[in-house]
Amino acid sequence: MLGLMQTQGLMISSILTHAARHHGAAEIVSRTHENTTHRYTWRDAEARSRRLVRVLQKLGVGAGDRVGTLAWNGYRHLEVYYAAPGMGAICHTINPRLHPDDIAYIINHAEDKVLFVDASFAPLVAGIASRISTKTIVMLTAPADMPELALAPGMTLACYDTLMDAADDDYVWPNFDENTASALCYTSGTTGRPKGVLYSHRSTWLHMYAVCLPDVLDIRATSRILPVVPMFHVNAWGIPYAAALAGAGLVLPGRHLDGASMATLLNAEKVTFTAGVPTVWLGLLQYLRTSGEKLHSVQRIMTGGSAAPPLLIEAFRDEYGVAVEHGWGMTELSPVGTYNAPKSAQLGLSKDEAGQHMLKQGRILPGIDMKIVDGEGNELPWDGKAFGDLMVKGPWIASAYYGDEPGSALDKDGWFATGDVATIDPDGFMEITDRSKDVIKSGGEWISSITLENIAVSHPDVAEAAVIAALHPKWDERPLLLVVPAPGKTVDPASVLALYEGKIAKWWLPDEVVVVPELPHTATGKLLKTALRTQYKNYYLKA
């Protein structure tokens, strides 16, 4: 017997119509590439998104077509986020930090019908124009700010504001199957070509409900949220949807994400919650310390993408009264999978214990599940000590990559292998100890590179650290520590190694410390350890 509830589908357009109808006056603030501040409301955004559908229709976009974007966080990009899926098309956000060859590959693999581009990326588009199949390029700007752009023969260049001015907003949002594809994001993997993850209206809604919960992002109508995480990176962690659902104020920072720009914007717009990767917060922390500036309204910072060093959590807590909270996810998870919000057992922790606990990536979001397994696939205990391959399953987790057979990314029981190695404690808090490919296997035992890195960056003279597995004639692999000095500092390797005393097993201690001027990073700001392994894998063999 079926229930007798209404069967209206979960449409992304209904998120926006809810915001317009019930939180119409809530503000959306954007810093534009024209270096101005643009302000309007959720009511305005909904009307303009309907207008944009008319533009897309005139450009030949129909149901199922991919609408590409190369853009920073701004109001025009937000309108594409809602208009494309709202009409049954697919919003395809593209990471402009990837190599141009990968960007061209992604555009062609997705077969983008139209490409919406911020003016700052005009040189990038000019460089790949002859290699992409997309024929229409729309610059997200006003007529007076249109850049000079030489395109390949047969391509058309248009101005967003001109197209919008010529369209009307009489479009009526349709209803269709909630499992219809809504958005497409490609992974920025360090090996092989990027792979597409195709989200649906239903998966987006379920993920959005979960991230709004009090024990996750705790988004409310009274919140003012600034997503530093780019809208081209896994849907800005779902924040553009979650903010609309809650009717929160949304502040979109544009392209200037340096410490000074961030501090100014956070304070001027009275932001209460912000989210981004640790490198952004380290830059903000450095600016605050050198300038003497304070954060006047920010209460919480979500950090993810890579593990946050303890000094980051402690400094914002002790010096600025701001809680830095760990989350974890990946493109294939829409992206948020866990969040570190306390249970009753954690309320009595001491300051130091609480700081240590916040290094964990957190508890699974309701609606999905996780487990850790050994090399034979056997589930491991949740004792906070055993670590194994992290597996996840649930309704906002990918079953396959774009173009592949449904279910092809899962094991026989429907679990998705994340590629992370983790522990889970008795309270269900998960902690990433490594990527599967980064773990150091020494003498048959595993060593966590992340644990070693977090200790190294607590040294006052160290700005950044990476630990890799270097081949060893006796132990198969041994940890090699590479460090970047803080500005104006000189690193003493012996003093760095001394930090590990009493914090790790003696056999975990890196055999050597190598001081380097910089470390390579991926397009999303993560350490590019494949390049480091290529350069240093034989370091101990040459000794």
Image (cartoon, grey):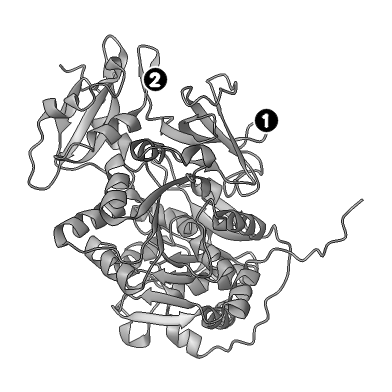
Q: Quadrant of residue 449?
A: top left
If the image is split into quadrants, where does the C terminus sit? top left
Horizontal side of residue 106 vs 308, given as left or right: right
Residue 521 visible? The answer is: no
Q: Nearer the viewer, residue 334 or 284?
A: 284
Query: Which numbered marker is on residue 412?
Result: 1
Amino acid beneath label 1: Lys
**Quadrant in the rendering for residue 122:** bottom left
- Badge 2 vs badge 1, beta-carbon distance below 8 Å: no
Residue at the limit of the structure toward the top, as seen here: 474
Residue 92 rendering spot, x and y as whole percentages: 51, 61
Q: Nearer the viewer, mark 2 or mark 1?
A: 2
Q: Which residue is disc 2 drawn over?
A: 446
Q: Is residue 268 found left or right of 489 in the rendered image?
A: right
Residue 205 as seen in the image, left or right of residue 265: right
**In what element is the residue under mark 1?**
loop
The answer to whether residue 423 is above or below residue 543 is: below
* Residue shown at the point (35%, 68%) measured from the top left: 253
Q: Does residue 30 appear in the picture of this structure?
A: yes
Residue 170 at x, y percent in the picture: 64, 87
Query: Of callouts 2 and 1, which one flags the residue occurring earlier in the amino acid sequence?
Result: 1
Give the distance between the C-alpha atoms of the residues marked 2 and 1, in whole angstroms: 27 Å
- Which amino acid is tagged 2? Trp
Looking at the rendered structure, the secondary structure element under dot 2 is strand
Residue at 25% over, 20% down? 509
Instruction: Residue 52: give x, y in percent of width and height.
Output: 54, 80
Tell me: 97 left or right of 333: left
Above or below, 4 against 471 in this view is below
Residue found farthest to the front:
348
